[in-house]
């Protein structure tokens, strides 16, 4: 067969009607969403299904002295009550560490604790009833006697002498620490023209998926299988987790994931209440449903980004960055979260600080410590918004100290576009990035001169506006270097099976999953393109461990780059197989034929020779008319894994134009821009919306979102009226542009696009606010940038 | 248990409901109309927006027992009526829905703009949609879809006047 190149399959041309890659094709699964006809996990109802509700710890840290269940069992509708010991009888605990994170430690975690509750909101007792309402009545009738214990809630004191050691068997509260170092930081900072430093704080956030965590587990005693309907990003990973901890064979567990109402990283972790539900189904032999309510979500969905970072930058007299020196401290929960661990976010900060820039000297340390608060773990853009805020905050401060324009300073220091491949001082390997092309593109979009003129004119009227920039890099298409080498059964490869049915239609089954980002749409586009059929002739199957090839699912921006490439390779293989069969039928050499818009055509002239429906009819019903030795399996499977680079980095730059009311401290974002380079853009419509949604999530975190605790570890923000998320009136129009630097690791050339918006938006907004506050000599570096913090920075309160 | 008889999407239904049963649980659990979603159950997120007697309400804040004699329209009924087929087409064309969990409520609220505020500006659209939380899209495409539908309907009205 001829060598396949991007050009040979039409990736650089749009002259074929089924050249779908690069086109804004609407999502085939969108119609059901706008008509309310999707199927989320809570929409699934099974015969004899019961409902679980949990009693959750009211204390941040307390010993469980006794659990009195009689009242609950006497409640109408209640069927059974489960304590930690009941669940532990069928379910083994887990310890969330990764071997490659040297020295990492955590304690065994049970679905429901046996002796102590270690955060407010930890599930402690499960009540199973005929309805959710009855289960909640049962929870209200439980009597638990607690002995409250001192709680460790301040990350700054977690390692101090006399701190409450949350798990005494670990010795201390230090989960993980790592330092990356390159060059000679001490010498570079000693001889620097200028050194500027600041302390940055990023707030504890949570994902607030509008569909709460949802699960139905059903154990069939006849065939010994556990079937789990689950709102998840990673069905195969969960299959392995349920099997391992419930002592089942992996093959006897099936995870089905239909429509998912948002994930953002929240739904890729193992939650104790969900494992408890699976254990209860295992014990009771009937389906059990659990859907978290919003109060439970705030207390039990993973939190993230609780960091305090002291950092400094050194520059020479010409405005060149010499180095970064960063000290990161992050407080997680009482346990590292299984199986990804809660050390990755801090590790990412170490990997990513200074990422877009050309400099020699680097030192970054993270320390990850335990706290009696909701466990933290990976949430959209893991570590990126933190590293970008630190880097870009320091870059703006350095430019100001040098009297340089922030754009000119970035232009001077961003890694040149022709300098690849190269490695960063923290050891990240970059295949190809486009910081300067992205900056050029951004400056075509942002009317900087007009904005600066407006800024001056408004200042004269007492209105304070600012323009902020943030360059960023983003880690996508992860290899086994992210989790697999640490011993976690988290697959970095992914597979796709593409088949042609008798009517000439095509079905693709993929291990990557749909959370609303458009995975199924791009898989349909890629397969339609690869096979040569109209996109509406492609059906997509995802989210079923029994019916899709084994894969990692959706995380770290891998769906398009990994799952998409597997789909493309299998589609091309199916086309080759179709042409073999067509060649035999038409007495033509396969290489003289092609498939276009569902027809086998003459490659040179494009003349239709045979429809795929006719080819299907012969293969499936009149196989007797084909040559005896002809391979006629119209189904192909390919798996893909990256091999050259541990990660495919993307890059981009954002700009934010904001107004600060210096009387009230309120911030209004006026307009926002982003140029990002995710390699080959498969569907511009979907990429733009991923970037916009990511930006709003980033702006929300920077302005409003904060899981607030009191000193005793009580969570104070447990409703959507307390934990504020952006609504449409507060958000600006967002302009998105693209530069395309395809990765050469794959034919498709796609990298990830889902996290770029969130990575850069908080830093761009912070720099815009500080640009607005510049006439007052005021500065904010602690997120969220609330009115109180801004007024304090202004010295007004 | 309280007996109620009401009209849902044009069909008469009679049920006995617990006093604590809210409208969304009634629709989802008693009638199997799963298009309306419970996002927060405390009246903030808007995922449960449905129409009662012509006005949009938060279904999670309305006891079903209070709806004897009421006329309720959900996303299923609104879709089948064709009233917002143009709006839904703009949502699909612009990818104004990602995970889709907020979308039925968003469509109900947008339909309210189409009915009551045919001249809404972009800022007014943003304001009116501000009781409906979307975590995925960033709102831009949703505002575009509503704006485009309003413009199309205004053009059609002008055409009809000629």
Image: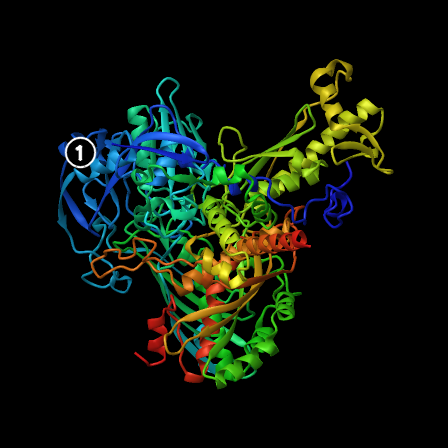
Query: Around disc 1, counting alpha carbons within 10 Å, would you say few (fewer than 14), some (14 to 19), or many (20 or more)?
Result: many
Q: Would residue A182 be seen by someone viewing this image from the given angle?
A: no
Residue in the foreground of this view, choosing between A655 and A242: A655
Q: Quadrant of the N terminus of chain A?
A: top right
Front residue of B79/A342: it is B79
Picture residue at 52% right of the left edge, 47% below the top? B98
The residue sitting at 69% across, 55% down in the picture is B162
Residue A723, image quadrant: bottom left
Is residue A435 in sight in this rendering?
yes
Q: Which residue is mark 1?
A: A72
Q: Where is residue A659 drawn, in percent x and y?
A: 47, 74
The residue positioned farthest toward the front in the image shown:
B161
Q: Which residue lies most toward the right here?
A: A605
Give the left or right position of residue B153, taking residue A57 as reference.
right
Q: Please give left or right for residue A555 compared with residue A629 in the image.
A: left
Q: How many marks?
A: 1
């Amino acid at each position: 067969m001829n060598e396949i190149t991007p050009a040979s399959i039409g990736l650089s041309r749009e002259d074929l009607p089924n050249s779908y890659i690069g086109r804004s094709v609407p999502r085939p699964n969108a119609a059901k969403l706008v008509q309310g006809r999707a199927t989320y996990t809570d929409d699934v109802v099974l015969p004899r299904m019961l409902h679980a509700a949990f009693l959750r710890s009211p204390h941040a840290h307390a010993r469980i002295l006794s659990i009195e269940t009689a009242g609950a069992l006497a409640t109408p509708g209640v069927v059974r009550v489960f304590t930690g010991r009941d669940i532990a009888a069928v379910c083994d605990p887990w310890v969330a560490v990764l071997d490659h994170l040297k020295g990492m430690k955590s304690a065994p975690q049970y679905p429901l604790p046996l002796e102590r509750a270690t955060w407010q909101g930890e599930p402690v007792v499960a009540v199973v009833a005929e309805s959710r309402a009855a289960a909640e009545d049962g929870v209200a009738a439980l009597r638990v006697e607690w002995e409250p214990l001192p709680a460790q809630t301040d990350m700054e004191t977690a390692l101090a002498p006399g701190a409450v050691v949350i798990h005494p068997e670990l010795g201390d509260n230090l989960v993980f620490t790592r330092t990356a170092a390159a060059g000679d930081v001490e010498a570079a900072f000693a001889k620097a023209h200028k050194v500027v430093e600041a302390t940055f704080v990023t707030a504890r956030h949570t994902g607030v998926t509008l569909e709460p965590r949802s699960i139905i587990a059903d154990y069939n005693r006849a065939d010994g299988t556990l079937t789990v309907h689950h709102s998840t990003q990673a069905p195969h990973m969960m299959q392995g987790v349920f099997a391992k901890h419930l002592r089942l064979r992996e093959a006897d567990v099936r995870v089905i994931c239909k429509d998912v109402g948002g994930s953002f990283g929240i739904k890729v972790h193992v939650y104790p209440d969900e494992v408890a539900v699976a254990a209860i189904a295992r014990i009771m032999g009937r389906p059990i449903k659990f859907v978290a309510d919003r109060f439970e979500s705030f207390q039990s969905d993973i939190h993230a980004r609780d960091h305090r970072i002291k950092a400094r930058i050194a520059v020479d007299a010409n405005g060149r960055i010499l180095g970064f020196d960063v000290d990161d401290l992050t407080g997680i929960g009482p346990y590292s979260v299984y199986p990804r661990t809660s050390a990755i976010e801090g590790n990412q900060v170490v990997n990513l600080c200074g990422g877009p820039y050309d400099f020699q000297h680097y030192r970054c340390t993270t320390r990850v410590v335990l706290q009696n608060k909701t466990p933290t773990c990976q949430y959209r853009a893991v570590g990126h918004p933190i590293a970008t805020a630190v880097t870009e905050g320091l870059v703006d401060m350095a430019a100001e100290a040098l009297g340089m324009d922030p754009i000119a300073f970035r232009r001077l220091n961003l890694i040149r576009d022709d300098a690849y491949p190269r490695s960063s001082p923290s050891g990240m390997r970059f295949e190809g990035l486009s910081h300067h092309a992205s900056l050029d593109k951004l400056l075509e979009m942002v009317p900087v001169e007009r904005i600066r003129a407006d800024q001056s004119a408004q200042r004269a009227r007492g209105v304070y506006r600012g323009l902020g920039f943030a360059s960023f890099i983003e880690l996508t298409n992860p290899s086994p270097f992210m989790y697999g080498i640490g011993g976690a059964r988290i697959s970095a490869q992914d597979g796709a099976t593409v088949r042609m049915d008798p009517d000439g239609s095509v079905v693709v089954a993929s291990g990557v999953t749909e959370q609303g980002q458009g995975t199924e749409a791009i898989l349909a586009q890629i397969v339609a393109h690869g096979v040569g059929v109209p996109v509406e002739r492609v059906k997509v199957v995802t989210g079923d461990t029994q019916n899709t090839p084994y894969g990692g699912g959706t995380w770290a921006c891998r769906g398009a780059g990994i799952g998409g490439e597997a789909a493309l390779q299998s589609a091309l293989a199916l086309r080759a197989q179709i042409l073999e069969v067509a060649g035999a039928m038409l007495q033509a050499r396969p290489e003289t034929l092609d498939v276009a818009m569902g027809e086998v055509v003459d490659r040179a002239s494009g003349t239709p020779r045979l429809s795929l429906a006719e080819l299907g009819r012969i293969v499936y019903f009149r196989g007797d008319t084909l040559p005896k030795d002809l391979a006629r399996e119209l189904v192909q499977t390919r798996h893909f894994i990256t091999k050259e680079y541990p990660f495919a980095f993307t890059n981009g730059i954002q700009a934010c134009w904001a107004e600060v009311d210096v009387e009230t401290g309120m911030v209004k974002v006026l307009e926002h821009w982003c140029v990002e380079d995710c390699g080959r853009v498969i569907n511009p419509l979907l990429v733009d919306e991923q970037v916009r949604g990511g930006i709003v999530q980033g702006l929300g975190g920077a302005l409003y979102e904060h899981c607030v605790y009191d000193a005793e570890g009580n969570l104070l923000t447990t409703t959507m009226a307390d934990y504020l998320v952006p609504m449409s009136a507060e958000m600006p129009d967002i302009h998105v542009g693209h530069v395309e630097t395809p990765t050469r690791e794959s034919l498709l050339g796609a990298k990830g696009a889902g996290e770029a918006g969130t990575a850069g938006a908080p830093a761009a907004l912070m720099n815009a606010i500080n640009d607005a506050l510049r006439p007052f000599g005021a500065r904010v570096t602690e997120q969220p940038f609330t009115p109180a913090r801004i007024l304090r920075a202004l010295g007004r309160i | 248990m309280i007996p109620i008889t009401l009209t849902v999407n044009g069909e008469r239904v009679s049920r006995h409901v617990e006093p604590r049963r809210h409208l969304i649980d009634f629709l989802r659990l008693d009638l199997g109309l799963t298009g309306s979603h419970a996002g927060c159950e405390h009246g903030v997120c808007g995922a449960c927006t449905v129409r009662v007697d012509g006005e949009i309400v938060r279904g999670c804040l309305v006891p079903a027992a209070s709806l004897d004699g009421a006329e309720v329209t959900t996303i299923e009924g609104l879709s089948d009526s064709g009233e917002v087929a143009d709006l839904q087409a703009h949502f699909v064309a612009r990818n104004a829905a990602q995970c889709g969990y907020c979308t039925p409520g968003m469509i109900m609220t947008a339909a309210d703009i189409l009915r009551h505020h045919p001249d809404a500006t972009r800022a007014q659209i943003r304001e009116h949609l501000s009781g409906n939380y979307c975590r995925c899209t960033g709102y831009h495409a949703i505002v575009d879809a509503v704006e485009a539908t309003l413009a199309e309907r205004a053009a059609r009205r002008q055409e009809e006047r000629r």
